Image: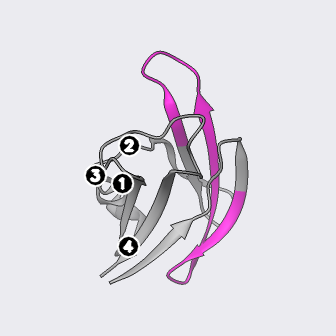
Amino acid sequence: MTTFAIPLSNTPQSFAIELQGVTWNLVSRWNDAVEGGSILDWYDAGNNPVCMNVPLVTGADLAAQYPHLGIPSALIVFTDGDDFAVPTLENLGVESQLYLVQP
């Protein structure tokens, strides 16, 4: 099994990343609302929206709910020391990370 950390930070950001031979443009931001949190938007290489407002939650494979993305790996959010602690504004990119896990 191979694990790759997708570089997120606790500030709004936009970047291109290649995952298993496909280039994606990712945008992450903080939703400062009740029940809000870190949100991720996915765009294809041409900046066409593919998947919007994906909450970064722990305990689930985020890619599993979007099979049309064609990512044959898991996207998992993990917080150091607590498998189920959701990312916060303060710890995203520090203690909470988004990982691509390849079988």
Identify the colour scheme used: one colour
Circles 1 and 4 in contact, beta carbons < 8 Å: no
Whole-number angstrom distance, CA of label 1 to CA of label 4: 11 Å
Q: Give the secondary structure at mark 3.
A: loop
Q: Give the secondary structure at mark 1.
A: helix
Whole-number angstrom distance, CA of label 4 to CA of label 2: 16 Å
Question: Which badge, 4 or 3, comes first in the chain's sequence?
Answer: 3
In this view, the residue farthest toward the top is 34
Whole-number angstrom distance, CA of label 4 to CA of label 3: 12 Å
Whole-number angstrom distance, CA of label 2 to CA of label 3: 7 Å
With 97 as the anchor, is 94 left or right in this view?
right
Q: Position of residue 87 (x, y in %)?
A: 47, 40
With 50 as the anchor, is 68 left or right in this view?
left
**Amino acid at pointer 1:** Leu
Magenta includes 19? yes
- Disc 3 residue crowd, few under 14, some 14–19, many 20+, Cα 10 Å: some
Circles 3 and 1 in contact, beta carbons < 8 Å: yes
Residue matched to label 4 = 101
Q: Residue at x 59, y 52 (%)?
A: 93
**Amino acid at pointer 4:** Val
**Amino acid at pointer 3:** Ala
Q: Residue at x 53, y 18 (%)?
A: 33
Quadrant placement of the C terminus: bottom left
Name above or below for residue 93 compared with residue 73: above
**Amino acid at pointer 2:** Val
